[in-house]
């Protein structure tokens, strides 16, 4: 017996099935997040991390942001 197909193994989220997923949600505009005007998925950390796969790029970005905020890193590496 082989592995199940992607269609058998995964269930699409409700917003996908209802056609309510907006493609502009895939690119966060950080200025809107800072201003409190971004979509809810970027304003609420619980929603954001429930919907976000932590890629290597995201992990590096988070590490760099917090390193700079804590004065542990300056400039490019």
Image (cartoon, rainbow, N blue to C red):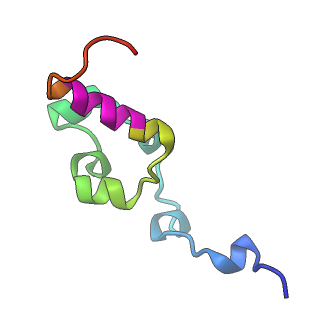
**Quarter in which the C terminus is drawn:** top left
In depth, the one of 31 and 3 nearer the eye is 3
* Percent coordinates x, y for residue 53 in the rendering: 46, 53
Residue 29 left/right relative to 45: right
Residue 20 left/right relative to 38: right
In depth, the one of 63 and 26 nearer the eye is 63
Residue 70 quadrant: top left
Of all residues shown, which one is farthest toward the right? 1
* Percent coordinates x, y for residue 74 in the rendering: 25, 14
* Percent coordinates x, y for residue 30 in the rendering: 29, 30
In depth, the one of 48 and 3 nearer the eye is 3
The region drawn magenta spans 60-68
For residue 53: magenta?
no
Residue under the point 16% across and 31% down: 35
**Quarter in which the N terminus is drawn:** bottom right
In depth, the one of 42 and 71 nearer the eye is 71
* Percent coordinates x, y for residue 61 in the rendering: 37, 32
Residue 10 left/right relative to 7: left
Relative height, residue 30 to residue 9 (above, below):
above
Q: Main secondary structure of the magenta part?
A: helix
Residue under the point 57% across and 75% down: 11
Residue 38 quadrant: top left
Residue under the point 34% across and 55% down: 49
Relative height, residue 68 to residue 21 (above, below):
above
């Amino acid at each position: 017996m082989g592995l199940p197909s992607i269609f058998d193994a995964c269930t699409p989220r409700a917003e996908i099935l209802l056609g309510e997923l907006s493609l502009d949600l895939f690119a966060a505009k950080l200025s809107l997040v800072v201003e409190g005007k971004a979509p809810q998925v970027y304003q609420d950390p619980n929603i954001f991390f429930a919907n976000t796969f932590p890629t290597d790029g995201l992990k590096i970005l988070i590490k760099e942001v917090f390193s700079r905020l804590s004065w542990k890193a300056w400039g490019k590496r």
